[in-house]
Amino acid sequence: MHSDGEGLSLDADKYTVELAPVGLQLGDARASTEQQAAFSAHGFLHGLDAIHKSGHVHRDLRWANGACDIDKERYFLLDLELCAEINEEPSFNLRSWGKHALVDGRYTAASDLHSLGRMLRELKATIVSKEGKAFMVELCRPAREQKQSAEQLLSHAWISCQGEHCRDAGAHPNDV
């Protein structure tokens, strides 16, 4: 969201800012090509990496909780209301988690990765390259068998992340 620049007003002691969405949201953000699937995995993994490094997990990975730019090249995680500390025993179980998300009854960083894999698996018909299929095998493991972190998965050949020089993930100053 951002101000459109013209929707600012001050009336007595009431300051109003009209916001407009940036990019595509909800169902419109769903990838429809293999390249878009790779872009979405890349952006969502950057978001998960930041969340995990803060000691938290997202817990609600669904297409409705993502957005992207109009070209479907940069994807962002939204809806952080279910975030919790890593390794917490959840008091609920979302259907989107499936039966392999929890590790000994706890939601872990690996649980988020497994949930991302379940989400991306909806695109399996578009992911046809050898690298894409190999990435999906890594990502879709049951959480207890997940051996890689979000940061490690970002280095997979299918995503080709530039590491700390990456300019594709997340919003940048002056993005409109």
Image (spheres, rainbow, N blue to C red):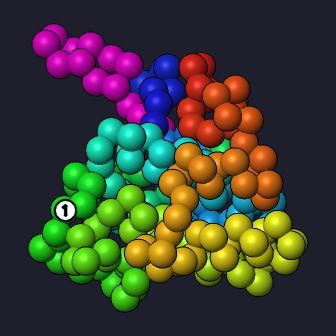
How many C-alpha atoms fall within 10 Å of the one at disc 1: few (<14), some, or many (≥20)? some
Q: Work out whether residue 70 can be spotted.
A: no
In the rendered view, tell whether residue 145 sits above or below residue 83: below
Q: Which residue lies at the image location 59% right of the left edge and 26% below the top edge?
A: 172
Q: Which residue lies at the image location 64% right of the left edge and 49% below the top edge?
A: 154
Q: Which residues are the magenta region? A: 8-20
Q: Work out whether residue 74 can be spotted.
A: yes
| Magenta-span inclusion, residue 52 | no
> Is the magenta region chiefly helix, strand or loop?
strand
Measured as percent of width and height from the top left, residue 19 is found at 41, 34
Name the residue nearer the viewer: 73 or 160.
160
Quadrant into which the N terminus falls: top left
In the rendered view, tell whether residue 7 sits above or below residue 22: above
Measured as percent of width and height from the top left, residue 27 is found at 55, 68
Q: Which residue is mark 1?
A: 88
Please state which amino acid type lies under the numbered disc 1. Answer: Glu
Q: Could you tell me which secondary element the residue under label 1 belongs to? A: loop
Q: Which residue lies at the image location 48% right of the left edge and 21% below the top edge?
A: 6
Measured as percent of width and height from the top left, residue 41 is found at 63, 58
Could you tell whether 94 is left or right of 1 in the image? left
| Magenta-span inclusion, residue 14 | yes
Q: Which residue lies at the image location 77% right of the left edge and 84% below the top edge?
A: 125
In the rendered view, tell whether residue 20 sits above or below residue 143: above
Quadrant into which the C terminus falls: top right
Name the residue nearer the viewer: 113 or 93.
113
Could you tell whether 88 is left or right of 171 in the image? left
Could you tell whether 48 is left or right of 22 in the image? left
Measured as percent of width and height from the top left, residue 54 is found at 33, 39
